[in-house]
Amino acid sequence: MSIVDLSKALGYKAPPTKVVFNTRDYLLYALSIGIHSNELQFLYENHPDFAAFPTYPLVLAFKRDNNGVSVYDGAGSDAIPGIPPFDPNTAVHGEQSLEVHRPLPVEGAEGYELQSTVTGVYDKGRGMVIERTAQLVDPKDASRPYATMMGSAFVRGSGGWGGPRGPVVVPGGKKPEPLDPPKDRAPDHVYEDSTHADQAILYRLSGDYNPLHIDPEIAPMVGLERPILHGLCTYGHSAHAVLKTYGGSDPRAFKFITGRFSAPVLPGDTLVTKMWNVPSSSPTPENKNQTRILFQTYAKERNQLVINSGCVVLQNPPMETQSKL
């Protein structure tokens, strides 16, 4: 049983991670999450509305400031004060969210940073959940982040130390809205798209070179029949499905996404994203012009739920156009 010192872990700010990205990275990422030639604004740099797909910042924790092939070292597994060292191979991606504050520069950028803070550590009995929140910023203008990303990792075998099981809501505090789709109605829309057998090989070129997604000898070591698709690739597929269906493929409309990974996807699986338009139960001036879409994503061939508790928020009218350096 690991001994965790929450007083040291919570609020820990990791050294900033330098990141670099360019137009080619945007093109490759869009192609790798299943965007097709009928949406050239994500695939053709000379399109008059060319833009980065909004979930692109999620790859930067892996890509960092490397434009070549990097050695995978388990992004997010660096030492945290108060948490005993753990094998990154025992950690699985649990939940992920992304909030877009302003569009990325269309030319890409150098010298930007990911500024990360440990915002939660929870004892789940069989394991431990570590939650980190990171902001993508230009250090010269750090008060105006481009995106805020919250990701959690479930570390198997590191629980049982008597810590909190999850976030504590103080009396009178605001509880998060439920993300379960309505049980009394069918999805409002369903989007279906096939991955291909080499999807993970393509997606890894965006910066996540974890050999689990390509090496057939490693997959069986962790109980898998063969290499699996990156969870964030499936996540990007789902984000695209919602934006195309409800946002007219306009990246400026994309405000927020969250989802929980529930099962792996195999390259070649058909992804089915089921969507429900469910307005917020607590209307505010901020969300009155937003569309709130709950979603679930399934691997069709096995009828396996692969992303649960999904939600995308779209802004109407959209944000400003993509910024220039």
Image (cartoon, rainbow, N blue to C red):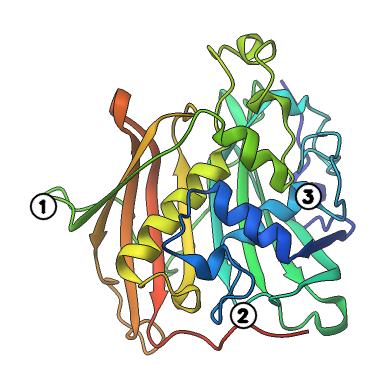
Q: Amino acid at mark 2?
A: Arg
Tag of residue 102:
2
Mark 1 vs mark 2: in front: 2
Res. 240 image quadrant: bottom left
Mark 2, Cα crowd under 10 Å, few <14 / some 14-19 / many 20+, is some
Marks 1 and 3, the one that precedes in the sequence: 3
Percent position of residue 168, x then y: 52, 54
Q: Secondary structure at mark 2?
A: loop
Which quadrant of the rendered structure holds the C terminus? bottom right
Q: Any mark on residue 136, and which? A: none
The residue that mark 1 highlights is 185
Residue identified by numbered label 3: 63
Identify which residue is drawn at 60% across, 77% down: 101
Q: CA distance from mark 1 to mark 2?
A: 35 Å
Q: Residue at x 62, y 53 (%)?
A: 29
Q: Nearer the viewer, residue 212 or 222?
A: 212
Three-letter amino acid code of the residue under disc 1: Arg
Is residue 158 visible in this depiction of the protein? no
Residue shown at 26% from the left, 71% from the top: 279
**Is any atom of residue 47 visible in this view?**
yes
Q: Secondary structure at mark 3?
A: helix
Q: Earlier in the sequence, mark 1 or mark 2?
A: 2
Is disc 1 placed on a helix, strand or loop? Answer: loop
In x, y percent, where is residue 297? Answer: 35, 43
Quadrant for the N terminus, please.
top right
Amino acid type for the residue under numbered disc 3:
Lys
Q: Earlier in the sequence, mark 2 or mark 3?
A: 3
Which residue is at 84% across, 40% downward? 69
